[in-house]
Image (cartoon, rainbow, N blue to C red):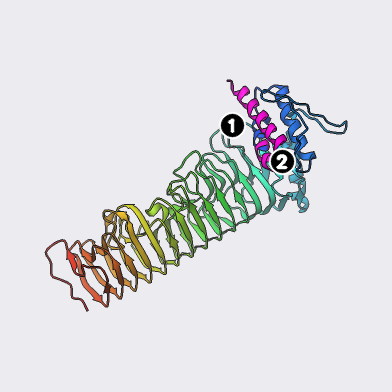
Amino acid sequence: MSNAQKLKSEIVVTIKNLLLTQMTETVPALKALSRNIFHYKRHSLKTVSLLWGALLLTQSCGGKSLRSTKVSGAETTASVYFSSSTPFLPLKQVRDEREELQRLIDEHAESGTPLKLPSGLHYISASLKIPSNLTIEGTGNSTEIFLMNSEVKGQNVFRIVKGSTNISFKNLKINANQQGNTGADLVAVFVPENVKKISFEKVCFAGGRDRGVVQVKGLNDQPVVGVRFVNCEFIEAGRTAVELRGTKDVEIKNCTFRNWGMFNADSPAIQLQSQDNIDVNISNNKFYNSFGRQFAIECAAAYVVNGKISNNQLLDQQNLGGNGISGYFKNTEISNNSLVGGNGNQRSGLEIFGINNRILNNCVSSGCIAIAPGLKEDGFNITITGNKIATKGENAAGIQIGNGKYNLRDVIIKNNIVDTRKAKGNSSAVVIGTYHLRRMVKDIVVEENTLYSNAFCIRMEALPGSSNIAIRKNICKAGMNWLGVITDSFDNVILEGNIKEMPNKEILYSIKMPSFTER
């Protein structure tokens, strides 16, 4: 069967379902098929008219089923009737509104008045340039700006003019048409350096391919300042939904993320990279992972500074590993996030590099907390408190500190509940000094934690020079031993008031060394 025949068959089946069932169950399928055929290069007028007639029926029937109506096609025979007042436009006559919309954009930007767009699909053949002092407002997702098929590289729906300010988008859908635009660097909204005050409220985004659906590309010395995403939906992304570089004063709040990583699964939903992002607030969002296998939020090769990532729900019901938070942070709080599902290790947990960070009251159902040094400096002043962590899989420890090229100091691990009993191999509840690689660690406090493990409740393994390790008042509920000492590399170790509820209450030493004193 040819592609055209398959498409026609899909349309007929969908229309048949429309006639025999409630309209509301079939409308989404009709809309999806309509987009495919709108830009289908080899459609027949008969097939096109068939679908268009069904869509007109959908709009005119008020959600009621049409059991008596018939449609002519390959799998059913019927007749569709239209009154003389019913508009009928073959789909191949879709009008390119790009020039008209650009004219309206320029006029409203100059006058400073909002551009209000009506409901409907507004088709454009190329990017719309957005200058300063512009608000574009629709009526909801029914106002959709749709980028027509192209093979041109670097296509956008909206391209913000460099250096512009005071731009707002509200109540509309921005669709870069992922399937129909095959050129590289497809981005729904592109924001270059030195833009100030740009906001998106109740906007639905779709269609990015190999970049972010929204790409904000500032520089450290020319940042994009004042970026807002509030109550937005990101429904599909070939790679990343939001890509942030070189920004300051960013808020992503009450948004929903779905279907990122469709073409490249090694992609997060939110990518912060290459240039520093300062004063970033990512809170109260929901992430539903279906394709990604490399975190939901990631900061790579640059820092998030003065950030807060809190009260987010990060769901990975297929256990792919795409619901964690990872990257380089300075003076950032990561708190009250709920990570549900996942692959059991750091990709479904919190992998935090850097300095002056606080990891507070997170619930990680199938991943770990891993702490590592900064980009070019030691990691220090890290607080890990009030978290609930469970891991699974091979060598999946609960809380780990180590890795990188530099060392770690001034780390507090307190009042956490850690359970690694579903993991295998070297999966201690807390590991002091090693996360993939051994590092030198100093001034570490492990205190008042409740620990369950399939290995050691606490494992000590670090480079020589490690010192000032205080392990106090932990409740060691289950494990092979409450404490395992792997390297003779620690000075000034304080063991005080720890409760051991497993049968073997001794310290296990892997090498010959002086025993620690317990109090």
- The total number of labels drawn is 2
Front-most of 516 and 450?
450
Q: Residue 28 placed where, x, y %?
A: 66, 40
Q: Is residue 59 above or below residue 3?
A: below
Secondary structure beneath dot 2 equals helix
Q: Answer whether residue 26 is magenta in the image.
A: yes
Mark 1 Cα-neighbour bin, 10 Å: few <14, some 14–19, many ≥20? few
User: Relative to residue 421, is residue 226 drawn left or right?
Assistant: right
Front-most of 477 and 295?
477
User: Relative to residue 499, is residue 306 drawn left or right?
Assistant: right
Q: Residue 108 placed where, x, y %?
A: 76, 49
Q: Residue 500 placed where, x, y %?
A: 26, 72
Mark positioned earlier in the residue sequence (2 or 1) = 2
Q: Are marks 2 and 1 in contact (CB under 8 Å)?
A: no
Q: Residue 75 placed where, x, y %?
A: 66, 25
Q: Which mark is residue 152?
A: 1
Magenta residues, dominant SS class: helix
Q: Residue 367 occupies which quadrant of the picture? A: bottom left
Q: Is residue 398 visible?
A: no
Residue under label 2: 23
Secondary structure beneath dot 1 equals loop
Residue that appears at 71% across and 41% down:
22
Gap in angstroms between the C-alphas marked 2 and 1 = 38 Å
Magenta stretch? 1-30
User: Relative to residue 186, is residue 143 drawn left or right?
Assistant: right
Image quarter hosting the C terminus: bottom left
As shown in the figure, which amino acid type bears the numbered disc 1? Val
As shown in the figure, which amino acid type bears the numbered disc 2? Met
Farthest residue toward the left? 512
Residue that appears at 70% across and 32% down:
15
Q: Which mark is residue 406?
A: none
Q: Residue 52 occupies which quadrant of the picture? A: top right
